[in-house]
Amino acid sequence: MGLGPPVLALYHQLKGVGVFDNVKEVMELGAQNVWCPKPELIKNLFKAFRKDPPSAELLDRFANWKGSGLELYTALGMNYSCTDVDPQFNSIPLDLNFDEVPIEHRGRYDFVTNHGTSEHILNQYNVFKAVHDFTSVGGYMLHAVPFTVHVEHGFFNYQPNFFEALAKYNSYEIDGIWVGPDWQLASFIPWEAKLLDFLVLNSKTTHLLVVLLQKKFDTAFQVPFQAVYENVTPEEIMQRYNIVVDGDLYDAKRIRYLSKEKFVADAIHHERSVANTQIVALQNEANTQIAALQKQVEDLRTSQSPGTTDLANVSGRQLLSALSGRIKRRIFG
């Protein structure tokens, strides 16, 4: 899709809140063009990064689709890399449907961008794993992808809940979710579901969904599961999934109980019900056994022959001794 006015305006804002303070290495998925016919927007961006004003030539290139991400990031003081099957930008030649991130590039980049690349990749697992693997611990991942309509643009559009699940299972911090009503406007709008009541939807609609995530821990990429189905999915299925919580890897059997008070309460209630049922069953079994023993004692008392010990007036120890003697006499004659 390239970097248009709203992306450049967002970069200005992110610089103001410190996101770019420690960014030295940038990785783009797909070598991107820069298009911005608003020279003041670009000048203000350079000023925010404390760089000399852009030259008239560079402003002209950005205004006419001739500028590149390489030129922009380099001018702002960052080292630029990209992965693309097109070698013209000195890119790392990866096919994101199949190829893994080379070892020497894993965890190396402070800012990894997906400006409209992932929707063209069928293997969504591999492309989002690549983003994860490229990113350093503490680094940022910025996705600017199709939201609604975008008829015939790519294979996929995206929903906020996808990135929320991605963040949950990998313990990413979500630093912002925005919607771009139009790629030519110089602003994004913070995401709220109610926005859908106001966004125009037609065959020409090209709303963007923009998400900023921060990688907090050095853990392997985890496949997300859609939250709405977690608690209605059998545990034998959920056991295939894992979730990262504060840097620790948990098996998915516990996923449904993490930070979900209702499900914790339900689990406790279920465990108490099972325990109470077991206690009642044990009590019933004990009562049955006691009743049987009492009956045996009564039978022995009533069946004693003349001259034998009066079982009604003996202690428990004496009773056991008498019972033992009777059993021996019956066995040995």
Image (cartoon, rainbow, N blue to C red):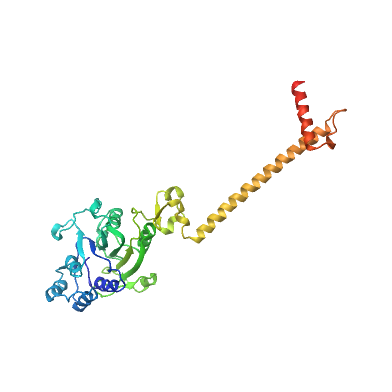
Question: Residue 108's x, y, as percent?
Answer: 26, 58
Question: Residue 313's x, y, as percent?
Answer: 85, 37
Residue 46 in the image: above or below residue 229: below
Quadrant of the image for the C terminus? top right
Question: Residue 182's x, y, as percent?
Answer: 27, 72
Q: Quadrant of residue 37?
A: bottom left
Return the residue found at the far left: 57
- Give the number of marks: 0
> Which residue is drawn at the image coordinates 59% and 52% (left, top)?
273
Q: Quadrant of residue 206?
A: bottom left
Observer-nearest residue: 5 or 172? 172
Q: Is residue 200 left or right of residue 332?
A: left
Q: Quadrant of residue 75?
A: bottom left
Return the residue found at the far right: 306
Return the residue found at the far top: 333
Residue 223 in the image: above or below residue 141: above
Question: Residue 162's x, y, as percent?
Answer: 36, 60
Observer-nearest residue: 307 or 149? 307
Q: Is residue 39 left or right of residue 318?
A: left
Q: Is residue 26 left or right of residue 272?
A: left
Quadrant of the image for the N terminus? bottom left
